[in-house]
Amino acid sequence: MERHQLEENPLRYVKAPRSPENPQIRTYTEDECARMLSAASEVQNDSVLEWDLTITLALVTAMRKSELLNLTWADIDFEERTVSVLPKQDADETWEWKIKDTDCRILPLTEDTVRLLAGLQNRRPEGYPYVLVPPGRYDHIQKYLRKTGRWSLCHARTSIVHNFNTQFDRILAKAAVKKGTFHGIRRTAITNWFYQDLSIYDVMKLAGHSKFETTYRFYLQVKDGLLDRARKATTHAVSPELLQKCCSSDIRGFNKRGCQT
């Protein structure tokens, strides 16, 4: 077709097969999040990521892994209790990084999270612009990778912290949480926003999605509470008397628990 050797595309009527959507998107329960934070707080090492704060920020802001690891102290407004998701320019102290999907956005922080951030800032030595990047790792990136030309825009998205997923899997195992991903924390936070009566549009903007379909299809988990409300609404609309008229012989043979009498 590209060479104009065919008059008609022989595949023009071929349609892609429809794949079933999976409504059960993995999110974490409140108890699982608590166990994760407890396990993460036991990881104490200056050369390791501040895992408890990283997980807390992900739960509070629904920021992506790349957004969290490229977060600088200049992005945090302690007075307003907000954090800005902003691209970074290639400079002496910071490396180039771009935002995924949509424009910059400002996210709220809780008072407890602000206190945790302030405590970390006081513990960190001066001259380290990134919030979560361990000082040792930052020095290695600056002195060895960037100066020798072995650092690119792709590395700023995928290689800031070595063995990120492996470390997170260890925390899940220590917390006795069924296998999941770090991105599941983002899904959990977005789903929690939705179930705290934020509109889908507001959730989409806070999450940094450029399309509504992305928020709805991949991040909004149908929780038991919603299923219970739907069940009650159906029970109210379809009364037992109506069911008895339609299928009395079937219903009379079962008790309330669904056991045959």
Image (cartoon, grey):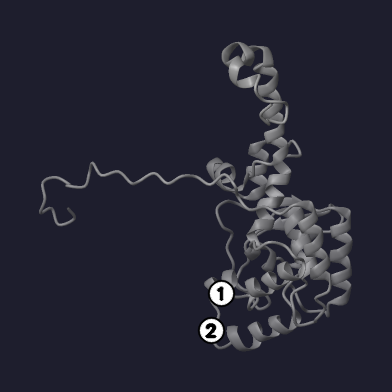
Coordinates of residue 22 in the picture (x, y in percent): 53, 47
Q: Secondary structure at mark 2?
A: loop
Q: Secondary structure at mark 1?
A: helix
- Asked if marks 1 and 2 touch (Cβ < 8 Å), the reply is yes
Whole-Å distance between the Cαs marked 1 and 2?
9 Å
Residue 237 or 102: which is nearer the viewer? 237
**In the rendered structure, which amino acid carries the disc numbered 2?**
Arg
Asked if one can make out residue 96 in the rendered structure from this viewpoint, the answer is no
Q: Is residue 171 above or below residue 60?
A: below
Q: Quadrant of the C terminus?
A: top right
Residue 55 or 95: which is nearer the viewer? 55
Q: Mark 1, residues whose alpha carbon is within 10 Å: few (<14), some, or many (≥20)?
A: some
Q: Is residue 41 above or below residue 76?
A: below
**In the rendered structure, which amino acid carries the disc numbered 1?**
His
Q: Is residue 248 above or below residue 26?
A: above
Name which residue lies at 80% across and 76% down. Answer: 43
Question: In the displayed structure, does residue 219 sit left or right of residue 18?
Answer: right
Name which residue lies at 53% across and 76% down. Answer: 152
Q: Mark 2, residues whose alpha carbon is within 10 Å: few (<14), some, or many (≥20)?
A: few
Name which residue lies at 76% across and 60% down. Answer: 57
Coordinates of residue 82 in the picture (x, y in percent): 79, 54
Q: Earlier in the sequence, mark 1 or mark 2?
A: 2
Question: In the displayed structure, does residue 80 sit left or right of residue 185?
Answer: right
Residue 180 or 72: which is nearer the viewer? 180
Coordinates of residue 93 in the picture (x, y in percent): 68, 77
Residue 196 or 95: which is nearer the viewer? 196
Coordinates of residue 6 in the picture (x, y in percent): 11, 50
Question: In the displayed structure, does residue 88 sit left or right of residue 119?
Answer: left
Identify residue for label 1: 155
Mark number for residue 150? 2
